[in-house]
Image (tube, helix red, strand yellow):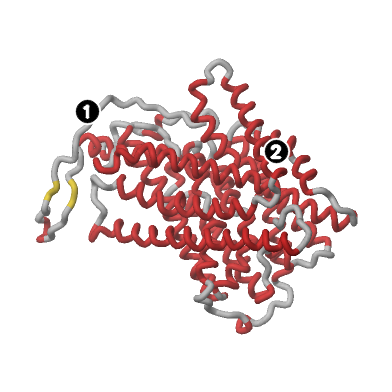
Amino acid sequence: MVNITDSGGKHAPQEMEQFLPGDGLAGNTKYKIQPRKDAEQAALNQTDYDPFADRQNEHPTTDSETLTHLLKASLGTGILSMPIAFMYSGIIMGIFATIITAFICTHCTYILVKCGHKLYYKTRRSQMSFAEIAEVSFQNGPKWCRGFAPVAKFSILFGLFLTYFGTCSVYTVIVAKNFEQVLNHWTGTEVSLRMLISCLLIPLILLSWIPNLKYLAPVSMIANVFMGLGLGITFYYLVQDLPSIETRNYFQMSTLPAFFSITIFAMEAIGVVMPLENNMENPRHFLGICGVLSQGMSGVTLIYMFLGFLGYLRYGEGTEESITLNLPVHEWPAQAVKVLIALAVFCTFGLQFYVCLEIVWDSIKEKCTKRPILVNYVLRTVLVTAAVVLAVSVPTIAPFMGLIGAFCFSILGLIFPVFIEMVTHWDTGFGAYNWIVWKNIVIFLCGIAALVFGSNSAIADIMKLYSDDTSAAPVAGGIS
């Protein structure tokens, strides 16, 4: 999936030469590391090599297509939990906390891509994956961290595959569960959840056969339309008979960690960022104030705030874990929301699956030179089948994936980008007063907090699931 071109010459490795006790400019004493000459020239002399001009994509995506994918990756089913997140934070605190969370997630994505662009010039490569950026940054960083480069790459690949493969399996359960609820309501008969999951196998295989992100863009657009219609109907219910804002809590500090554990993992889409950037026709347009990333996350943040604010304002302390559970079940528009969201999740499967496919294919494609296209499509079929089999075997997989997601996304989405930025900028300094260091310390602490509180919330969900099973008849699945 990823074509990496290395056209640069070989450079003899050089050790970190010296630490300067100060540079005497304007009377300021500032400790810094002397840059290695080869790295400095490769990073700064951009006229010598342009990685974006050298990049060769057979089917590059436009800015609008990339924006469509980014919106779909960030507007997942987690958005339906925003009203209960606002209940945990308070209606006023929720607005500011959502903005802060979105800023942190977006900033971590930004520094990952920014470091990737810097490493393109330094290593004379035209594109790299998330794991390759980590590996190369450690290899070109200070001497003490170079031995960790293979560990960093493997950790990211393993974490991404585990998270996104599990997400694909959970998505099949979500789609089947929503259709099960609608069919049970309108037919009056019990439909087997496992049978519905099995019926999704062939459609999901066909969806996975879409060859690249260029041709997957219309599917993501359709998914956005379905999600938009579902949210539109939901907003219609939320604005009916709104109570006064004074009847709701403004600030809730005791349960604020629960808010962050919900919101961070709902917004996080770090795994799809580099595949999207690598397939862009104009990769420089991904960043910037008016870039694809800023546009997408600004829109996502507004939608998250509006849904959370109106959902909590409308239902108060009666807000459910998913806002769809608060909708009147006997009205057909509420049933339409379930169908539309199920269709949106189905169409999103292809984008989530692309991350898994890229990881596995990049590891075996060099060994498959005789019939690479046939092997690629066999691999797609096998991975989708494995995800569906896992869903059929364990339809209550969602809480377990919540635990894996809390562990992996906090590390991959918040902590790893911080370390990558530190080692990437090690030879050029960390800005005035080392502001990059202090900023990254704050983000690192946020990542640790997300890891702790998110894992605690997921473990509580698992315990609740099995405590319910012991007190009632087992129910296949529990996802709305």
Dot 2 amino acid type: Leu
The residue carrying pointer 1 sits among few (fewer than 14), some (14 to 19) or many (20 or more) residues within 10 Å by Cα, namely: few
The residue carrying pointer 2 sits among few (fewer than 14), some (14 to 19) or many (20 or more) residues within 10 Å by Cα, namely: many
Say which residue appears at 61% left-offset and 80% top-offset. Answer: 248
Dot label at residue 12: 1
Choose top left, top right, bottom left or bottom right for residue 390: top right
Choose top left, top right, bottom left or bottom right for residue 262: bottom right
Dot label at residue 204: 2
Dot 1 amino acid type: Ala
| Residue 336 vertical placement versus 170 (above, below) | below
Q: Nearer the viewer, residue 177 or 458?
A: 458
For this orientation, the residue located farthest to the bottom is 246
Say which residue appears at 55% left-offset and 79% top-offset. Answer: 250
* Residue 80 placement (x, y as % from top left): 65, 61
What secondary structure is found at the residue carrying circle 1? loop
Choose top left, top right, bottom left or bottom right for residue 65: top right
| Residue 320 vertical placement versus 146 (above, below) | below
| Residue 429 vertical placement versus 151 (above, below) | below
The span from disc 1 to disc 2 (Cα, nearest Å) is 49 Å
* Residue 156 placement (x, y as % from top left): 45, 43
Q: Nearer the viewer, residue 311 or 186?
A: 186
Asked if residue 131 lies left or right of residue 431, the reply is right
Say which residue appears at 11% left-offset and 56% top-offset. Answer: 25
Q: Earlier in the sequence, mark 1 or mark 2?
A: 1
Say which residue appears at 69% left-offset and 49% top-offset. Answer: 344
Q: Nearer the viewer, residue 385 or 1?
A: 385
